[in-house]
Amino acid sequence: MNLGLFGKRMLLWNAAILGTAVAALLANLLGLLFGFASIAPHLLYIPVVLAAYKYPRRGAVIAGGIGAVYLLMVMFIAGTSTAILAEAVVRTLVIVVIGGLVAFLTLRFREQELLYKAVFDHSE
């Protein structure tokens, strides 16, 4: 199968997003199981930022999916501990907001880039 340069680049982006998401979720699972759950959730920002940058129209949705998986993990492992669940809900909301913000900024950046190219093309 010949993907070409564009296909290889997309494959690399998708692999990076999926790989970092899986690694971050596994780190969170281990953190929840072994009691160091305060550091690992910050790793979830990496796949969220990558996905929101590459796919800005779906950035908040992808961030919501990652956040939902994290929240479900916490719910199943931590049980009914109110403090831990409250922290997980807040972290999930922050993850979604970060995904939406990066997606919005990326869209604005791309719009400005198109305007700049149009001005530059007309100036020649």
Image (cartoon, helix red, strand yellow):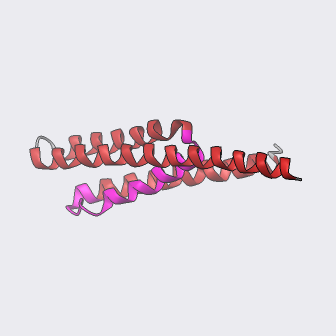
- Residue 110, given in percent of the width and then of the height, sits at 64, 47
Q: Nearer the viewer, residue 52 or 80?
A: 52
Give the side of residue 120 with respect to residue 71, left or right. Answer: right
Regarding residue 81, the answer to whether it shows in the image is: no
- Residue 5, given in percent of the width and then of the height, sits at 80, 51
Q: Is residue 66 magenta?
A: no
- Residue 85, given in percent of the width and then of the height, sits at 17, 44
Residue located farthest toward the front when viewing the structure as drawn:
123
Q: Quadrant of residue 36?
A: bottom left
Q: Is residue 35 magenta?
A: yes
Residue in view at x 50 percent, y 43 percent: 104
Give the side of residue 62 with respect to residue 3, left or right. Answer: left
Magenta stretch, main secondary structure class: helix
Quarter holding the N terminus is top right
Residue in view at x 46 percent, y 57 percent: 46
- Residue 95, given in percent of the width and then of the height, sits at 36, 48
Please give the range of residues in magenta: 31-56
